[in-house]
Amino acid sequence: MDHQLPMNTRTQPALYDVDTLQTISSWIFRLQELSTTTELADFPRVVMESLKPLIPHQSAFWGGGRLSTNAAILHYVYLVDLDVAALTAWEKCKEQVDDVVRMLVEHQGTAITFSDKVPLDHPFYSHLYHPFGINDVLSIYQFDAQLGIYHVTSLYRNDGSIFTEAERGIFQAVARHLTSALRTCQIAHIKRLNESPLINLVAKAIVDTEGVIHFAEDRLIDSLRTEWPAWEGPWLPHQAWSDLSKKKAHRFTGKHIVLSLEGHETLRLLCARPKLAIDELSCREREVAKLFASGLSHKEIAQHLTVSPSTIRNQINAIYEKLGLSDKGALSAYLSQF
């Protein structure tokens, strides 16, 4: 009996091998990390550089905006190793290459290799390709129908080679991840502008009610090992969990790190940061420091806390010494970070 599968159900040759798929997976994982740890100004260049092992290219365009009645309006533009004169050239000849734009729009979500789709005698080549040494373009147009916003990402080659079908497929597969990561990076950038500088020092993890770590940033694991070099998960060190699980404190202060716990659900947010000078202050010293920095005098603080002015004066001198400061202005500026 012939046990062969029918022709239409036989396994077809794979376009990508296992190693390539693993490389793509690793890159997406890395992209997610970059979206929250890289400054927005550096993000496009860093990401495009990380993409080169998957899809070699020499320069890139990354932009997007909204559509108006007469034209597309750019809200953001990132040029990576691409001469800014290319944008000027585009403005001058965009009506002549309008059919190329329509092609991208009509194939939204599909990566296009220009060497396959654009005729060699097209003005696109003479106005935009050749003046900037470009010999092939790989581009994709994405449209967010809910917001009415479009995104265009293009990779350029000037080494004489053209983009392959495999590379086109990879680019199409990762394009949405690029856009999502850029959105995450932009939001993180805005949040950082409105948060304490201390936020950049904080690493995070998810723990349960028994002190077991379920998910953690690599930085948090590194932080734990600065305090406990031989530590291995998944449980937090007993000393730390004992302090963190106390109802009022939810805080552990060690020699090198400070841990804090947020939330009261089954899974909670664990935050770790390096130990700072302010962590050397007692609870009373912190209270006095905040009152003094807010503008109250020694006598006013003494009355508020029902102690003598000399006691407050001594505490402020101790605060200055621990923080390495010498005046009220510096104290106020320092405390504003926390």
Image: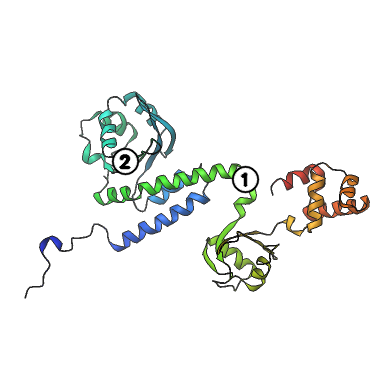
The amino acid sitting under disc 1 is Glu
| Residue at x-position 28% and y-position 28% | 98
Q: Which mark is residue 334?
A: none
Residue at position x 84%, y 55% in the image = 318
- Give the label on residue 195, or none: 1
Instruction: Give above or below for 48 relative to 209.
Output: above
Marks 1 and 2: in contact by CB < 8 Å? no
Q: From the viewer's side, name the closer residue of 309 and 98.
A: 309
Percent across and percent down for residue 201 are 61, 54
Q: Is residue 82 visible?
A: no
Residue type for callout 2: Ser
Decide if residue 113 is in sight here.
yes
Local SS, label 1: loop
Q: CA distance from mark 2 to mark 1?
A: 36 Å
At x 36%, y 59%, the residue is 23
Residue under the point 61% across and 42% down? 194
Which is closer to the viewer, label 2 or label 1? 1
How many neighbours does mark 1 have within 10 angstroms: few (below 14), some (14-19), or many (20 or more)? few
